[in-house]
Amino acid sequence: MTTLGTGSRQWTMVDEGWGRKAVDFATLSEPGNCREYVAMHHRLGVDAGDRLLDVACGSGLAIELARLRGASGAGIDASARLVAVARDRNPGCDIQVGDMNALPWDAASFDFVTSFRGIWGTTPGAVAEMHRVLRPGGRAGITVWGHLKVSPGAWALAPFRLAAAEKVGNQAVMVSLGRPGAGEQLLESCGFLDIERTEVPFAWEFADPQLYARALAATGPAYEAIQNVGEAEFHRAAVEQAQGQLRSDLPLRAEIKVVGYLARKPEGE
Ligand SMILES: C[S@@+](CC[C@H](N)C(=O)[O-])C[C@H]1O[C@@H](n2cnc3c(N)ncnc32)[C@H](O)[C@@H]1O
C-alpha cells in the first residue's frame, strides 16, 4: 500500500519502505496472511505440476504454500530484501527483483498468476502484464482490501493514518479496487473473462501489543507513518491501539475484509 512504486522508475524506491525490516515482515507479518493464500490457491485449483507466478510476492510465503500443493513457483517483488527471503524460502525458484508493470517473462509462461494485496486501483499496467504472461485458459487470482470501515479488525490498520494527509489520501485511492464493480471493470478491460468476486478469509493474530506494533512497523504504509511521526511515536500509538483490544487468555485478533477476484484468460488468445 505504499505510494512508492506507481511511477516509471519509482518502483526502485519501494525497498526503502518494504525492505527495511524484511526479517520482521517475513516472520511476524506475512504469516498472518496465510488464510488468504490457502483460500485463493484452493479456489483457483492450484495443483501438482502447475506453473504459478506470484506478483508483488513479498517474502515469498504464498509461493512456498503453492509449492506444497505441487506447483512450481515464480515471483517478482520490487524489494530486493524481501526477494532475498523469498529465494531463501523457495530454493531454485525463479524469483526476481523488478517492477510488476513490466514482467520479465514471456507471454503464456504460467498456468496461474496471483497477487495478494499487491495490485491496486493505481496499477492497471500490472493487471495487463498478468494477462500477457498467462497461457490461454490460465487463471488469475487477485486479492485487495475490502470494506475496511466495517471490518472488526480495522483497528489494526489505524496507525497507518499517522502518515502525512496526502499519503493517507493516496492509500485510500490505492485500495479502491475493493469497491463493487471496480475490480471487475479493470479485469475486463485487460481482457479477462469469467470474473468472479469472492470474500477471502483474513485474520491477523498477535501474542501481545508489542509484537503487533513490531509486525506492523515492518510494512510499507507503516514506513510512511514513521516518516511523518517517527519510529518511537508510531510504536507507542500502535501499542496503545492494541491495548484496547486485549482479551483474557486469547490472542489479539484482527479480522479484516479482503476481496478476491478470480478470472480467466480466454482460450485461443
Ligand atoms: C501489501 S504487500 C504484499 C506482499 C505479499 N504479497 C503479502 O501477501 O504479504 C505489497 C508488496 O508490493 C511490492 N511492490 C510495490 N510496488 C511494486 C512494484 N512496482 N513492482 C513489484 N512489487 C511491488 C512491495 O515490495 C510489497 O512486497
Image (cartoon, helix red, strand yellow):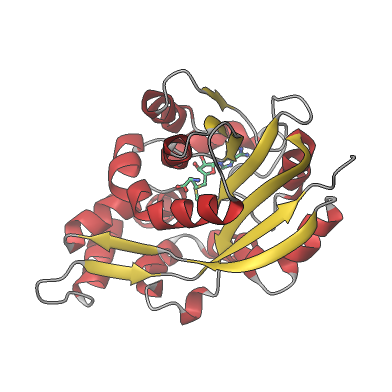
Marker count (numbered): 0
Relative side of 46 to 155, left or right: right
Among all residues in the image, which is located at the extreme bottom?
150
Residue 146: image location, x then y, percent: 55, 70
Q: Residue furthest top?
A: 92
Q: Residue at x 62, y 53 (%)?
A: 142
> Taking 171 as reference, is 215 left or right?
left
Direction left: furthest residue: 249
Quarter of the picture holding the C terminus = top right
Picture quadrant of residue 161: bottom left
Indicate the quadrant where residue 255 lies: bottom left
Is the residue 194 above or below the residue 75 in the image?
below
Where is residue 249 shown, x and y percent of the image? Answer: 9, 72
Furthest residue toward right = 268
Q: From this viewpoint, is residue 1 visible?
A: no
Q: Residue at x 28, y 64 (%)?
A: 238
In terms of depth relative to the viewer, which is nearer, 116 or 13? 116
Please tell me whether residue 49 is drawn above or below residue 35 in the rendered image.
above
265 relative to 199 in the view: left or right: right
Q: Nearer the viewer, residue 23 or 136?
A: 136
**Residue 132 appears in view:** yes
> Residue, x 85% and y 44% (percent of image)?
267
Q: Residue at the spot x=43%, y=69% of the render?
A: 256
28 or 226, which lies in front?
Answer: 28
Determine which quarter of the picture holds residue 87.
top left
Q: Nearer the viewer, residue 267 or 253?
A: 267
Q: Residue 17 location, x and y as percent?
A: 45, 41
Q: Position of residue 191 (x, y in %)?
A: 85, 50
